[in-house]
Image: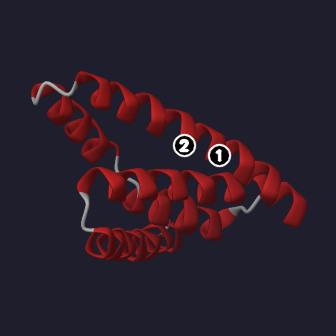
Amino acid sequence: MALVTALAVGLGGSAGAVARHGVSERLERRALDTLVVNVAGSLLLGVVLGASVGGPAALAAGTGFCGAFTTFSSFAVETVGLAAEGRRRAAAANAVGTLGLAVAAVLFGRALGAAIG
C-alpha cells in the first residue's frame, strides 16, 4: 500500500470517526443516531461513486470517512437488542427501515453525484 493511499484512508477515517461521535453526542438516542449516520454515509458514498471521484480523494471520502462514519455493527447490536427485549416489530422495522433507507440514499447519491460531477 502506498503511503499516499494509507494517509488518505487514515485522514478520512479520523474525520469520519470524529463526525460519528459528534452525531451520537447531538442526538443522544442510540438507534436514531445509528440510522442517521448509516443513511447519511450511504448518501455521501453514493455521491462519491456517482461523481466518479477517483484516487486518494475517493479513498479518503469513501473508505476512510464513510467507513468510519457509518456503523453496521451498532446497527446489528441494536436490532438484536430490540428483539431480545421482546420488541420484535421494532427490531424488524429497524432492520428493514435502515437497509431500505440506506439503499435509497446510495441510489439518490449516485444520481446526485452524476449530476454534479
What amino acid is found at the position of numbered circle 2 in the picture? Ala
The residue under the point 24% across, 67% down is 28
Residue 70, by quadrant, is bottom left
Q: Do the residues labelled 2 and 1 touch (CB within 8 Å)?
A: yes
The numbered dot on residue 30 is none
Q: Which amino acid does label 1 sit on?
A: Val
What separation in Å lies between label 2 and label 1 (alpha carbons)?
Answer: 6 Å
Residue that appears at 41% across and 70% down: 16
Residue at the spot x=79%, y=59% of the render?
Answer: 113
Q: Name the residue under label 1.
A: 106
Q: Is residue 98 above or below residue 67?
A: above
Q: Where in the figure is residue 56, as x and y percent of width and height? A: 61, 69
- Indicate left or right for 3 with 88 as reference: right
Residue 29 in the figure: left or right of residue 84: right
- Disc 2 is placed on an element classified as helix
In this view, 65 is above or below 38 = below
Can you identify the residue that label 2 sits on?
Answer: 102
Image x and y of residue 9, in percent: 46, 66
Q: Position of residue 44 (x, y in %)?
A: 61, 60
Q: Is residue 18 at all visible to an observer of this figure? A: yes
Density class for disc 1 (Cα within 10 Å; few <14, some 14-19, many ≥20) is many
Which residue appears at 89% of the width and 59% of the height?
A: 115
Percent of width and height locating residue 84: 11, 27
| Residue at the limit of the structure toward the left, as seen here | 85
Q: In which quarter of the image is the C terminus?
A: bottom right
Element under disc 1: helix
